[in-house]
Amino acid sequence: MNFKFLFPTFRNRYLYVREQLRRLSKLRSFERTLNLGTGEGDYDRMIAGFVKGEVIGCDVNEDDLNHARQINGDVPNLRYEI
């Protein structure tokens, strides 16, 4: 479990992004997505579920990206770049 969901600000932001992706995915399909400032990859699994092709998570913090790779390593259409 991601304990960040216990914080209302994180949870509300996550739910907002998910709802917007649901709404937009009804209008068009996402073939490729870039998540700039992906951080620790908290949203990437959810985002990858809406994308038919590749999701690239990008961040300048290599430690955050290593954490993201660890928690999302089983998501086949997701990769990380510095």
Image: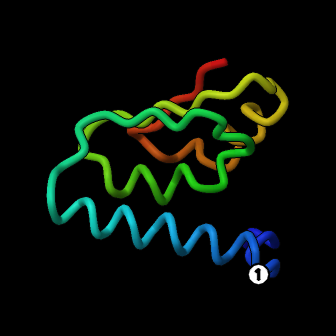
Does residue 76 appear left or right of residue 37 in this picture? left
- Crowd band around label 1 with a 10 angstrom C-alpha radius: few (<14), some (14–19), many (20+): few
Q: Is residue 64 above or below residue 46?
A: above
Q: Quadrant of the C terminus?
A: top right
Q: Is residue 15 above or below residue 71?
A: below
Q: Secondary structure at mark 1?
A: helix
Q: Quadrant of the N terminus?
A: bottom right
Kind of residue at badge 1: Pro
Residue 14 picture location, percent across and down? 59, 68
Residue 56 picture location, percent across and down? 48, 31
Q: Which residue is mark 1?
A: 8
Residue 31 picture location, percent across and down? 23, 37
Name the residue located 18 percent from the left edge and 49 percent from the top edge.
29
- In front of the other: 11 or 72: 11
Does residue 68 appear left or right of residue 62 in this picture? left
Does residue 10 appear left or right of residue 76 in this picture? right
Q: Write down the quadrant of residue 23 in the picture.
A: bottom left
Name the residue located 51 percent from the left edge and 30 percent from the top edge.
79
Q: Write down the quadrant of residue 30 in the picture.
A: top left
Q: Write down the quadrant of residue 80 in the picture.
A: top right
Residue 48 picture location, percent across and down? 41, 50
Q: Is residue 29 above or below residue 64?
A: below
Task: Count how many numbered circles sit on residues in the image.
Answer: 1
What colour scheme was applied to this rendering of the protein?
A: rainbow
Does residue 19 appear left or right of residue 43 in this picture? left
Name the residue located 39 percent from the left edge and 66 percent from the top edge.
20
